[in-house]
Image (cartoon, coloured by chain):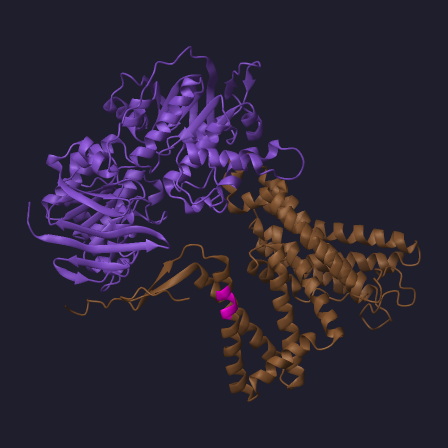
Amino acid sequence: MAESLALELKGITKSFGSVVANKDVDLKVYKGEILSILGENGSGKTTLMNMVSGIYYPDSGEILVDGNKVIIKSPKDAFANKIGMIHQHFKLIDVFTATQNIVLGIKEGKFNIKAAEKKVSEITEKYGFNIDLNKKIYEMSVSEKQTVEIVKVLYRGADILILDEPTAVLTPQETRKLFNILRKMKKDGKSIIIITHKLHEVLDISDRVTILRKGEYVGTVETKDATEQSLTEMMMGEKIELNITREEPKNPVERLVVDNLTVIKGDGSVSLNNVNFNVYGGEILGIAGISGCGQKELLESIAGLQITTKKSSILYKPDDLGPQQLVGKTPKEIRKLGIALSFVPEDRLGMGLVGNMDIIDNMMLRSYNSVRGSFLNRKQPKSLANEIIDSLEVVTPSATTPVRRLSGGNVQKVLVGREISSEPKVLMVAYPVRGLDINSSYTIYNLLTEQKKNGTAIIFVGEDIDVLIELCDRIMVLNSGTITGIVDGRTATKEEIGLLMTKSVDREDSNG
Amino acid sequence: MDKAKKHEPLFHIAKRDSLPMYKSWAIRCAAILVALIVAGIITMLLTGENPLNVYSTMVKGAFGTSRRIWSLLQSLSMLLCISLAVTPAFKMRFWNIGAEGQVLIGGLATAACMILLGDKVPNALLIVVMIAASISAAAIWALIPAFFKAKFNTNETLFTLMMNYVAIQLVSYFEMLWENPKGSSNIGIINQSTHAGWLPTIGNFDYLLNIIVVFALTIFMYIYLKYSKHGYELSVVGESENTARYIGLNVKKVIMRTMLLSGAVCGIAGLLLVGGTNHTITTTTAGGRGFTAIMVSWLAKFNPIIMILTAFLITFMQAGAGEISTVFGLNESFSDILTGIILFFIIGCEFFINYKLQFRSSHKEVK
């Protein structure tokens, strides 16, 4: 490892109101190394890096680049110091091509698109990026968009690259590709900082790991001396068990029979194409797929939020009634039958919760109408709110705190807790652990497993294939709106699922 | 190093936690004080008048005589009434800037009943008809943009704005049609001799009925927004339409229902203005209150009780500013300048309630 320092942080502190996001954090990054920053959600990883890239300004502390003290007040200053950050949410203009996005906002000298294009393609060749530079952003997959972001940063001459949770949206194959590129950059002498909470990736890619806990610097270790267990302990500050106890489903009852489910969007594109599957009570059915493969439309169809084609049929078989056709029913009617959907969108708040309302009023979202008359009754929602705060250990000043003031993990606990509290017969959860730390994630997995034991049919849409394999009884793989396979969670391998996730795209290509 | 090296900024902005109630009000009061000082300095520079004299004239203009106090209360209650009307719409993030037109239509319906039915039906019945007509006319007027928003997702801001002009032209058309006396091209006092359709006065107080009605409306709106299912639903729609959809709310229905209510309250304002105080209608009957009301409502953060305060503040300033322009022989524009300065500080101080400035090296908090 080259021993010259590229970036050094000394005693960085940043607080938002009374919340201390970073307290006295030190960090060193050498040239030609990959450093992982590991920490629970809310441990201040992203905040710290946002200060390096000019989004925030630290309350105190120093930033040194190449040994010189620098002041970074804006992303422009960051680029002047050869620092570039690839954010979790891409900042690209949809109707522009890759090249146009890459050169956007650069003012130096006379603008020459030809020369710019040449420089861009030099960069992509050098590191082996596989990308069509004339493609428009809206036609791109998430992984391609990410590539554009990385090239954009390189184009601006960054020597220090910061990637915020880069693999959260990628398939295993895409992740491997990305890692290969990162290794090439490292060889080229660039410094790379990866923010992540996936332990196996940390062990796979990085040279050193810096661990943050609750905004404070815990320590830095050489990756070769670390194990998943040792890293977890540093992260959590205590030993924890990372197991999901998966029991065999007990007397599974058929709950949902989905036949010929087809969803065609307003613009004529097919989101779901002739999907057939069954869901059983007492089992967890996982749904794997890259984002945009139709999982959202699938869940929304069952919940009555999507318009499906005429031949589609979703038959629900409750214990007390005859089979019920869900297609054509309103979301409210479907809910009343005992089918719950909790969808955690990318911004975590957009669906299912109202950020400006407090926990009590959010509890009421589902139930306010079950009270008679035209007035609200906050008594029951209040006790439910307190129950959830207690049982799921939601960190909040009180039940009357607006949900948007809670951290991501706590927001999700509130959402999932509410959905489970209605004791549904079918529970659909999408990305319930999106952005959550390990501990909270396992709390949620255990909640779901608990529900499964109670005989609930659970449909689980997740990003992390490792978790799907560990948690689900069966895993259904969706690709471009088609089911490419349903595999047994106990025997499936990561590679097998990864292949199924991309398989049908290839088939479509070969068919023309 | 070289010129690329930058200085540490003098201060930077940081978000604060929620402030305790008393602190945020202290900031607001400080803002008004600063506004008065700045306005005073500007008064002195521009006119040479002693600002203290100017201010005391302002207060006199608003509270000087019992007549003035009553008239202040009347303006306050009308402004508050229209503010209450726009509040549910804005809380639903439906930009209803058409209150002006909705009030006019309510007033026009009232005037129509008074002119066409006056002395033909018993007075009590006439008043009942007036109430029904004004409320339903304004409600329907407000429903039109809501319907198009719900069905075709049209832009409600432009739609409601343009409906104002339609309403104004309608009123001027009827002014010509019902002109009295002939050739005056305005309606004059309706039923001046018979008082048919004039809303009853309570005791000797001309404006007391309006004030009581608006006070009751304030309480109603507070309860409606805070404790009713409808109020809850409209705030869910306003905060996040996706969430509303997810919990199975009929968003279109909520939009239309809320605008019906918004229009209905505007109709009441029109009724009170035409049937209660003016007994005539002109194109300026609403008098820009439909727009001022938006500010009142936002300043109060959609809380009807606080709205009493913000409506009072604005009414007071308008009354006072009008007085200085006559007493000191300054023109109307000068009072607008003062009102503008004061509002600038009041709205601007919200920044210091949400954020704080952190100065270099020292971590002192400012304001």
Residue B287 in sight from this viewpoint: yes
- x then y, percent, for residue B199: 83, 60
Give the residue drawn at x 41%, y 39%: A411
**Left or right placement of residue A323 versus residue B125 in this view:** left
Residue A265 appears anywhere in the view: no
- The boundaries of the magenta stretch are B26-31
Looking at the image, residue B24 sits to the left or right of residue A496; the answer is right
Residue A228 image position (x, y, % from top left)? 19, 31
Q: Nearer the viewer, residue B127 or B216?
A: B216
Quadrant for residue A39, please give it.
top left
Image vertical order of residue B308 relative to residue A463, above or below: below
**Per the image, is B264 magenta?**
no
Which chain is in purple here? A
**Residue A259 image point, x, y percent:** 47, 18
Q: Quadrant of residue B114?
A: bottom right
Magenta stretch, main secondary structure, is helix
Colour of chain B as rendered: brown
Q: Is residue B350 above or below residue A89?
A: below
Front in this rendered view, residue B7 or A244: A244
